Image (tube, helix red, strand yellow):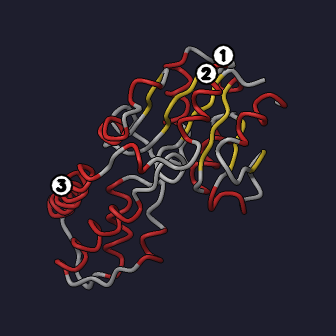
Amino acid sequence: MSKAVIFDLDGVLISTDKLHYKAWKAIADQEGIYFDEEINNRLRGVSRMASLEIVLERSDREYSQEEKEKLAEAKNDIYKESLKELSPKDLFDHAVETIAALKEKGIKVAIGSSSKNTRTILRQLGIEDVFDAISDGNNITHSKPHPEVFLKASEFLGLEPEDCTVVDDAYAGIDAAKAAGMTAVGIGDATNYEKCDHTISDLYELVDLMEEN
């Protein structure tokens, strides 16, 4: 049985997709670049700068590195301001119950998210202190599908990668989990991904799954 579950944050415990979308849309509109929800879906699970490159694909001009950094910062300012709207009621169904049930069984829980705003979000949700480890965009240099964020999480937990199970809703997250040598559980969009070791439609299914494996 795995000794720990590492949760991706966005799309697994909460959805901030709409907040990200509004922030990127504001930047794209400012620059006169077409942007829609389909393009926004390509940004899931990737870093801020990598996301910006996708947004700028439709631009008719080149941007300097300095300009890109200013745009990424402006997007993040808009997004961070919107995070103040979050509260515990925004957590997905059974998120709190699932984490509590896992901990009761002696299974450690951690966060593995590329977002640099992870702790702010967890604080707004009232669950920052329930995790045994938090690995996020502030302690990594490579975004998913690179395994670094999950490998750091297992390191913070004091466990070997093979003792950890990852829950992620993005293909890039599943790729990262497999590259880390961890068990990959897909939820949401990732349930269609053949690289998943297991798939679940509700977070609480994880409790039984962890008993079986």
Task: Specify the amino acid type for callout 2.
Answer: Lys
Who's the residue at 65% across and 53% down the image?
Answer: 187
Name which of mark 3 and mark 1 comes first in the sequence.
3
Indicate the secondary structure of the residue bearing disc 3. Answer: helix
Structural distance between the alpha carbons of marks 3 and 1: 39 Å
Q: Place residue 4 in its image quadrant.
A: top right
For disc 1, the marked residue is 106
Tell me if mark 2 has few (under 14), some (14-19) or many (20+) residues whose alpha carbon lies within 10 angstroms of its own: some
Identify which amino acid the numbered label 3 is placed on: Asp
Residue 152 is situated, as x and y percent measured from the top left of the image, at 49, 27
The type of residue carrying mark 1 is Gly
Q: Which residue is mark 2?
A: 103
Measured in 3D between alpha carbons, the distance from the residue under mark 2 to the one under mark 1, in whole angstroms, is 5 Å
Image quarter in which the N terminus is found: top right
Give the answer, above or below, for where 172 lies relative to 204. below
- Mark 1: few/some/many CA within 10 Å (<14, 14-19, 20+): few
- Please give the name of the residue rendered at 51% of the width and 27% of the height, measured from the top-left corner: 153
CB-based contact (under 8 Å), mark 2 and mark 1: yes
Q: Residue 53: which disc?
A: none
Q: Give the number of the mark in front: 3 or 2.
A: 2
Mark sitting on residue 77: 3
